[in-house]
């Protein structure tokens, strides 16, 4: 369960802490874990929220954000499960790899094994999910992609028919084609590739007509891609190999 703080921040609204605490108490039997209500840009206020939630009898996951002092990451490491956040902002795109390299150098022991479970908030990058030993991540890319009329497609594998190990190819099926989409649209692909795409869609239990018409079916086939991608990752915990480790020490 995410607090929705980032969404509220981008919409210039607020999430009331007391309301959030009340909601969690009402539904905690349906929740495995839930995040602290973070205050974007104010790390001290975030930790005050964390302490208030603990005093209210809850056990939220603390959050460490891009740009915060390192001591707060060490505070997070006092817990067996916490979140890394602040990476979904466009302004943070260039900081993600340096931030995560340094964070996981601290999070992991000398053998590269994580000392705690780490959740990546808004972690949409397939490359970064493979680079770092996250225990869990969340993302809305599969929903947004489906809503825009597109689906995730695997690569053509060498040893297997479908390769789910990397970033998916995004192909549009929308009737509302834009000029930018023309080279990424099913209707403009080669005949051979269209046949391969239809074969994949049917292999996954869908039909071309439904993929064209139903955002729910597009969501479902995108979720299926994520499940297949997860199967290609090592079983957690697995080591983080940071070749720049000496730089940070």
Image: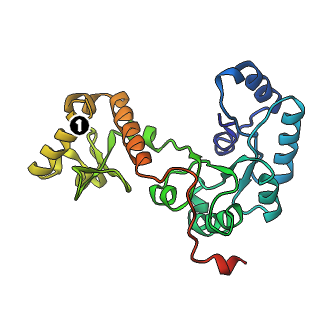
- The percent coordinates of residue 66 (x first, y second) are 69, 60
Q: Is residue 207 visible?
A: yes
Who's the residue at 21% across and 30% down the image? 207
Q: Is residue 87 above or below residue 45?
A: below
Residue occupying the far left of the picture: 191
Residue 97 figure quarter: bottom right
In the rendered image, which residue does mark 1 sit on?
201
- Total tally of numbered discs in the picture: 1
Label 1 CA crowd tier, 10 Å (few <14, some 14–19, many 20+)? some
- The percent coordinates of residue 153 (x first, y second) are 30, 47
Q: Is residue 243 above or below residue 69?
A: below
In this picture, residue 240 sits left or right of residue 6: left
Residue occupying the far front of the picture: 111
Q: Is residue 100 above or below residue 129?
A: below
- The percent coordinates of residue 64 (x first, y second) are 73, 54
Question: Is disc 1 placed on a helix, strand or loop?
Answer: helix
- Which quarter of the rendered picture does the N terminus lie within? top right
């Amino acid at each position: 369960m995410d607090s929705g703080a980032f969404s509220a921040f981008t919409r210039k609204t607020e999430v009331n802490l007391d309301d959030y605490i009340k909601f969690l108490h009402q539904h905690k039997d349906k929740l495995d874990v839930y995040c602290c209500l973070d205050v974007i840009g104010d790390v001290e206020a975030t930790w005050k929220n964390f302490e208030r939630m603990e005093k209210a009898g809850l056990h939220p996951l603390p959050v460490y954000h891009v740009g915060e002092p390192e001591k707060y990451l060490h505070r997070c490491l006092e817990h067996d499960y916490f979140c890394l956040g602040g990476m979904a902002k466009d302004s943070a795109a260039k900081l993600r790899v340096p931030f995560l390299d340094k964070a996981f150098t601290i999070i992991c022991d000398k053998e590269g094994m994580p000392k705690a479970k780490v959740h990546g908030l808004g972690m949409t990058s397939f490359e970064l999910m493979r680079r770092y030993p996250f225990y869990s991540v969340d993302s809305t890319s599969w929903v947004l992609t489906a809503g825009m009329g597109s689906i995730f497609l695997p690569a053509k594998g060498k040893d297997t028919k479908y390769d789910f190990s990397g970033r998916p190819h995004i192909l549009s099926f929308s009737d509302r084609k834009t000029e930018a989409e023309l080279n990424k649209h099913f209707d403009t692909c080669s005949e051979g590739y269209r046949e391969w795409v239809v074969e994949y869609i049917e292999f996954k239990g869908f039909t071309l007509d439904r993929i064209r018409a139903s955002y729910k079916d597009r969501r479902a086939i995108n979720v299926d891609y994520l499940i297949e991608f997860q199967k290609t990752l090592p079983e957690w915990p697995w080591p983080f190999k940071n070749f720049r480790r000496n730089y940070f020490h």
